[in-house]
Image (tube, grey):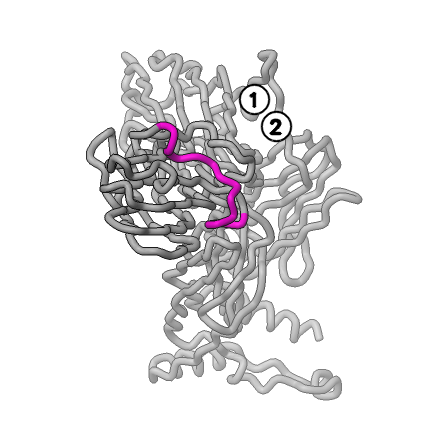
Amino acid sequence: MRTVALLLCVILTVGVANAQMNPPTGLTSTHDGDGHVELNWNSPNVLGATSWQDLVDWPESDVERAEWEAPNFDEVRSQWEALQSQGNQLDDLQFFFVYRNGQQLDITYDTQYEDVLPSENTYVYTVTAFYDLGESNHSNEVTVTWFDQVATAIDEDFNDGEMPDGWTVEATIASHTWEISSNNNLFPTPYALVDSDAAGNNPPIHLQERLLLPPFDFSETSFVEFVYSSNFVEYVDEHGYVQYRIANGDWVTINDINQDGEQIGVTHDLTAELAGESDVDLSFFYDDMTNWGFYWGIDDVEVSRDYVPSDPVRLEMIGRSNIIPADGGWLGFDVHFISTLPNTVQNVKYWTTITMPDGTESDRLALTTFTHTPNMDVLYEALQQEIPANAPAGEYFYNGYVGLSLNNPQIEGSFRFVKLPSENTDGAGEFVFDPSEWELLGLPGEVTANGEIAVNLPSDYELDLAYPNPFNAMTSLTLRLPEVSPVTVAVYNVMGQQVATLAKGSLDAGVHNLSFDASDLASGIYFVRASVPGQLNHVQKLVLMK
């Protein structure tokens, strides 16, 4: 039995190293605005033979297992390679894993998946392909944000019996202009009415009565809709015009009502005409040429528009001390995160890097996680970044990123600083970036109303997904602890043998970045286990591919 297990381990290790487990590509999403998401992606191309199971006569019973002799793996591999050279591709793709916010959501055998979102929030989707030999890397990410973007600027049914605040009337005969009527001749509930018949026609008067809605600012919208109900009683030479104007310009008619009848829920999509305009008026204009008209009633008026700020989320990186001496020093700066989004999003990540004078970007310097709350405004003030003496002279950029995934920043900011040259230029060009020499002080922290620094601690015990995974030699994991805890984080091979210890002992509350250096280990599948007694027992699969 041990021989069989060892053989499986060897085959699995070599198979993972050689298999071309391509991830799905072209992941896209559509959202109906009501929490229903459809994902579509392309199936990966399977190149070469990556399935070897059919080449081995595996035992099927306990008796057969006891008497089974392992085949010569060199011969199995030769057969495998021969199949590839002959162009006989063994398609070992089994199914797809769908991930939502880094957590495995479901298994599907199709290249399409429909999901129902649990609540209004922001979600990141990826898909992986699962082969006989394991799971592929993740596809590209797609982000779906679900919150009610449509806001009702006007929703008026006139049921309080009075002219609404902000509504105005331009009248030719003040005693016979627009009013709120409870007469049920036109609508069963109160409505706005202009009564031409009551004005009489001796002598004839050209009656023009305009009912104006409050002015609108649609400069930060991408959708405008105007809805109302109308009941028009016509006699001769009268019109009911529904109109708009921009910046006190000419009135534009979008509906000319000149026939008897009731129209319920008339809808005008005015996006093309009004979205982006900052000074807009809407009105109902009654025009009775000879004062021989009767009535016009308006009810259930709605004006809807979304709110899409031109810059709904901003990350401001503000340098305080932008000149660093030749022998190194501390770079002072502030970070200001401002958001006008109305939704709550958990596990939002903020991290930093530095762009070096040669244009290359450093490894991640810092990482913290926070919960985005509606209309969030957070200031990280007086942060201090160490710039070591051996850092090369020249122009740098300090970069900040915010996103739900470390490989997909959604907003970013930066500021420039300069390190002065040293008189001694020996060793120029030999600089090697070492994150341990670039200490960051003051993160995480939030300036509260009384000026004190409040540390943002994780709310749950979590071990984030390793990144990258699959990996070559080095991968990173993030451990989150809401309080001081005894922690063990260890890595095991497929035989259950411990091969590495990433953390052991008491760790402070906060976010801890762990690295797994597998440069001395063979390619294959490993498992990392994070344990906090009574709080966390998480196992995650790692794929080492060299």
Question: Viewer-proximal residue, 188 or 456?
Answer: 188
Among the 4 quarters of the image, the one containing residue 478 = top right
| Left or right: 133 in relation to 358 | right
In the rendering, at what x and y percent does residue 293 appear? 31, 46
Residue at horizontal 56 percent and vertical 22 percent from the top: 446
**The C terminus lies in quadrant:** bottom left
In the image, farthest residue toward the front: 202
In the rendering, at what x and y percent does residue 406 appear? 47, 42
How would you rate the neighbour count of disc 2 (Cα within 10 Å): few for under 14, some for 14-19, many for 20 or more? some
Dot 2 or dot 1: first in sequence order is: 1
The rendered magenta stretch, by its main secondary structure, is classed as loop
| Left or right: 344 in relation to 45 | right
Residue at horizontal 42 percent and vertical 16 percent from the top: 331
Q: Give the residues drawn in magenta, as a range.
A: 174-188
* Measured Cα–Cα span from mark 2 to mark 1: 7 Å
Among the 4 quarters of the image, the one containing residue 301 = top left
Which residue, given by chain and number where applicable, does mark 2 sit on?
456
Residue 361 falls inside the magenta stretch: no
**Circle 1 SS class:** strand
In the image, farthest residue toward the left: 250
Tell me if label 2 and label 1 are in contact, CB under 8 Å. Answer: yes
Q: Amino acid at mark 1?
A: Glu
Residue at horizontal 27 percent and vertical 47 percent from the top: 239
**Circle 2 SS class:** loop
| Left or right: 401 in relation to 254 | right
In the rendering, at what x and y percent does residue 279 appear? 29, 30
Which residue, given by chain and number where applicable, does mark 1 sit on?
446
**The N terminus lies in quadrant:** bottom right
Whether 537 is drawn above or below 61: the answer is above
Question: Viewer-proximal residue, 223 or 516?
Answer: 223
